[in-house]
Image (spheres, helix red, strand yellow):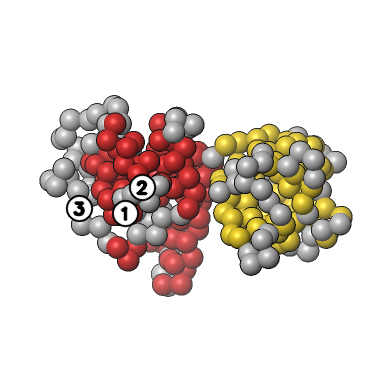
Amino acid sequence: MSGVISQINAEQLVIPNWIKNNAKWWYQDQIQDSEFIKGIQYLIENKIMIVPSVNTNANKENKIPSWVKNDAGWWANGTISDNEFVSGIQYLVSSGIIVVNSIQSNSNQCDKYTTAAEKETCLGQLEYDEKIKNYMETSTPTVVGPVTFYYINSESQKTDDGKTILTIHFVIQNNANQEVTMTCQRPDSCNYSLSDGQNEIQYSTNTLVYGSLTLIPNTPKLLDWTFYGLIDSSKNYSFLVKENWGSGSIPIKIP
């Protein structure tokens, strides 16, 4: 393997917690190979994980070796380090099992701008568009009326008072041919909440501006919701939508 693994840049190696959760679930056969690979593709395409260039002349494999899955389980349990886990993923890329996309081929469209600020803005928009595209390809979609909610992941943090700060990340897209408005004026007057099937927890913060967000047709947006309360990770939680244009329940994983 030493011939296909490049040097890991430790300063850039910051792996989100939800990837470790995916590794655990994959090792326990709770998610499929394809779901695990989608999460890894996100890391690579957003340059969180450094990988070598793929040798296009190399023989391509179509199956993930069992030792990689073992590595994922050991990494999730803290038995091996981030660098050891990444080494296994780098092998998958070098073998062509994981295919990495890049926005580099599109970056030349920013060459038309003459100032550094304009080029930077253009490249930033390309990166943002690519990030949303990757999220939509790797996330679980739930359709509520005319809007599709792509659930990306959740992050949780315990507080000193025994409660939990839970942040949920979505990409949302309006599939109708007219504008749709999401409404949440304040915690006691909001069309969105977190539920364990018996009780509802109202939001603490979200990225709706001035209590509403107008969704332009076919223009996806990133949207975050943060909840604070007594959240029991052993329970099944859902993100509830109660709009006049549609109602629904989106299953949420508690890290």
C-alpha span from label 1 to label 3? 17 Å
Left or right: 15, with 228 as reference point: left
- Marked residue nearer the N-terminal end (3 or 2): 3
Identify residue type, mark 2: Trp
Residue shown at 47% from the left, 37% from the top:
25
In the image, is residue 179 above or below residue 112? Answer: above
1 and 3 marks in contact (CB < 8 Å): no
Identify residue type, mark 3: Ser
In the image, is residue 172 above or below residue 64? Answer: below
Say which quarter of the image contains residue 203: bottom right
Left or right: 12, with 236 as reference point: left
**Disc 3, SS:** loop
Question: What number is the disc on residue 89?
Answer: none
Residue shown at 24% from the left, 42% from the top:
91
Q: Nearer the viewer, residue 38 or 25?
A: 25
Left or right: 2, with 183 as reference point: left
Q: Name the residue under label 1.
A: 81
Q: Mark 3 points at which residue?
A: 6
C-alpha span from label 1 to label 2? 6 Å
Residue shown at 19% from the left, 48% from the top:
5
In the image, is residue 103 above or below residue 209? Answer: above
- Residue 46 in the image: x percent, y percent? 41, 53
Question: What number is the disc on residue 75?
Answer: 2
- Residue 186 in the image: x percent, y percent? 83, 60
1 and 2 marks in contact (CB < 8 Å): yes
Q: Nearer the viewer, residue 245 or 200?
A: 200
- Residue 158 in the image: x percent, y percent? 60, 60
All told, the count of numbered labels is 3
